[in-house]
Amino acid sequence: VTSGNFTGPGMSQNAEAAIRVEKEHIQEMNFSWTEFVKSISEQKWDIHQLSAADVVEKRIEMENNFIKIFGKRFGFDEVLNYGTNGITISTATDWRPTLAMSMYIDEMQAGDVGIIAGGTNDWGRNVEIGKADDISTDTFYGALNTLFEKAKKRYKQIIVITPIRRKNCGRNEKGYTLSDYRKAIKLKAEEFSFFVVDGDEIELEFSEHIPDGTHPNSKGHRIYAEHLINKVINAKLTV
């Protein structure tokens, strides 16, 4: 008996299994392949069919991403969004470490302006903060040093945004708060002379702008973008 692969909403993992069942054991269990196949074909499947409204809503969300809004405001010829849900800055995680920002920046296109917004998933995945002079991407400080060192060689102007607020963010398993990661980001970004925006200052309401407690909706992205734009304009930053 060999299984196939399976995926589902929010799932990206494959499951494989193969076992051998002797004929006498099948008879002892009173197992019937005919009944088995019949049960599969007659079961109720939970199938979600996208409506036209769903497609439009998703397209609006993509167009209203804060990066897109920011780029449009300043007349950028091209805006590339490398953001991916769940990705950390550090590689010290079992969730797609090769896509950690400190490593994946090597695959990103160089340009005039680089906007770096991360850290919330490092808190969520209990990444050790480490020491400010770390160079290993296994710690948060080490990953920041690596990321920022690479970033300054790829972008003429760099804007760093610390994590926005999120629900239920007390201390993680390492004993750190989200503010601890914000402080580390701010410290290293200022050492590299990058422009820093405090994400905690962005006025987002959970019920209206962050319904899942972590990710802003289209309204939230609009407020996020406006806050960022105002900070850049008020600082007379060249972008």
Image (tube, rainbow, N blue to C red):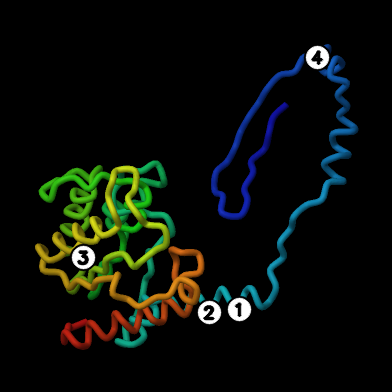
Q: Residue placed at 39% from the left, 75% from the top?
A: 204
* Image coordinates for residue 49, horizontal then vertical, percent: 72, 65
Amino acid on which the number 4 mark rests in the picture: His
Labels 4 and 1 touching (C-beta < 8 A): no
Q: Secondary structure at mark 2?
A: helix
The front one of 16 and 131 is 131
SS of the residue under disc 3: loop
Mark 3 and 4 residues: CB-CB less than 8 Å, in contact?
no
Nearer the N terminus, badge 2 or badge 4? 4
| Residue that badge 2 annotates | 60
Quickly name the residue at label 1.
56
* Residue at the extreme top: 24
Q: Are discs 2 and 1 less than 8 Å apart at CB?
A: yes
Label 1 amino acid?
Val
Choose the circle earlier in sequence order: 1 or 3: 1
In 3D space, how far apart are the residues under numbered discs 2 and 4 (Cα atoms)? 56 Å
Q: Position of residue 69 (x, y in %)?
A: 38, 82
Tell me which numbered mark, 3 or 2, is placed earlier along the sequence: 2
* Structural distance between the alpha carbons of marks 1 and 3: 35 Å
Residue type pointed to by label 2? Ile
Q: Disc 4 and disc 1: Cα gap in Å?
A: 53 Å
First along the sequence among labels 4 and 1? 4
